[in-house]
Image (cartoon, grey):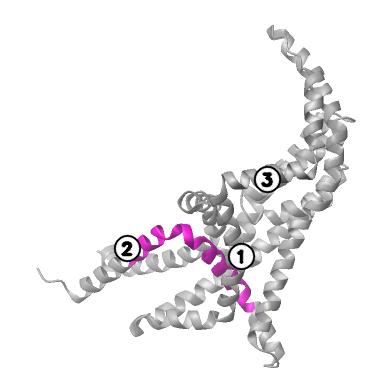
Amino acid sequence: MSLTPTQKSTAAWTAMAVLLALALWLLAPVLTPFVVAAVLAYALTPLVDRLDSLAGGRFPRFVAVLLVELLLLLVLLGVVLLMVPILAKELPQLREQVPVLLERLDGWLQPLLAPFGIEFSLDLASIKPAVMKYLNANLEETMGSLLASLKIGGSVALTVFGNLILIPVALFYLLLDWKHFVARVTELVPPHLRGSYDSFMDESDDVLGQYLRGQLLVMLILAVYYSVGLSLFGLDVALPVGIFTGLAIFVPYVGFGLGLALAALAGLLEFAVSDGPSKVLLMLAVVYGLGQLIESFFLTPRLVGERIGLHPLVVIFALLAFGQLFGFVGVLIALPASAVLLVAVRRMRSRYLDSSLYRG
């Protein structure tokens, strides 16, 4: 049975798509830094172009690329440095208040378990010295433990450090030659499909631009919200913890979890002795509980989902599905990738409604 030209074309495109998907699946372990660099290059290329045009050709493009990449590294370094005041505040408190917290925990557990016939008592005479010895360990012992753990998980550590080096290098070359890469990909599109391809890419660019602006707005709002909310409860490190939580929301679930853990630790060390753990639980429930509801059911669906045309349920499903399929990188690219898929689905739906298959 001979195939029609349309069937041959469909079969060829299907085969190429399957081969591409198979290659991506086989190369997934080494693609992570390149995918991250490509996403960053897509987002930062307009800024590089803007600097390049403002310079008017007075210096090469690679200077603009270096400036933008340096700005990105400074922003990331600033986020990391937010941890410095938190650690500087909490580590001394940890040494001072852990013994007191252990005594309060022992006094709280004994009456709680007594009605069940359970006699419980912490061996504070043994636990306190062990905990204090661990907290007062010198730098040499700490570094020794770190080096030992790196030896045990050497391949993992090597992969992480390799990616940290490779991502900026890949980002530099992608920013430098982004238009060239895009042009080479466009050349592969058959001429009779070029109009549809250009229209699709223009619509995708518009949707992704809406996504980036919406995501940045969500991060800004949440950074202000968490900083103000924690400050109202009197937390000393409210500003760095709040800003870190708001910015880290860019990584769904993980960012919120890190911010919650930091706030819980800071609150326990600051309030547990004077006000008891009830104030810490109240602070976390009010600030982070309400914040998660606002972010999940209002800010992200309204400012991100609606901007790119995704229903709130689709946003949640996309995060879970991409995370399951591609891990941590999948969570990062879930919404922008879903935005591009949405453009494709819209076009497929339009063609289906105009087709003889639908009309009968």
Q: Main secondary structure of the magenta part?
A: helix
Q: Earlier in the sequence, mark 2 or mark 3?
A: 2
Left/right placement of residue 109 relative to residue 210 reads right
Q: Is residue 304 left or right of residue 340?
A: right
Marks 1/3 in contact by CB < 8 Å: the verdict is no
Quadrant of the frame with the C terminus: bottom left
Quadrant hosting residue 224 = bottom right
- Residue at 72% x, 54% y is 246
Residue 121 on the magenta span: no
Q: Nearer the viewer, mark 1 or mark 3?
A: 3
Name the residue located 28 percent from the left edge and 65 percent from the top edge.
Answer: 359
Q: Is residue 20 shown in magenta?
A: yes
Mark sitting earlier along the chain (2/1): 2
* Kind of element beneath mark 1: helix
Report the residue at 40% width, 78% height from top. 196
Residue at numbered disc 3: 146
Residue carrying label 1: 165
- The answer to whether residue 290 is seen in the rendering is no
Magenta region, residue range: 17-46
Image-quadrant location for residue 197: bottom left
Nearer the observer, 344 or 262: 262
Q: Position of residue 170 (x, y in %)?
A: 56, 71
Check disc 1 and give the amino acid type: Ile
Disc number for residue 18? 2
* CA gap, disc 2 and disc 1: 32 Å
Do residues under tags 2 and 1 come within 8 Å of each other at their CB atoms? no
In the image, what residue type sits under mark 2?
Answer: Val
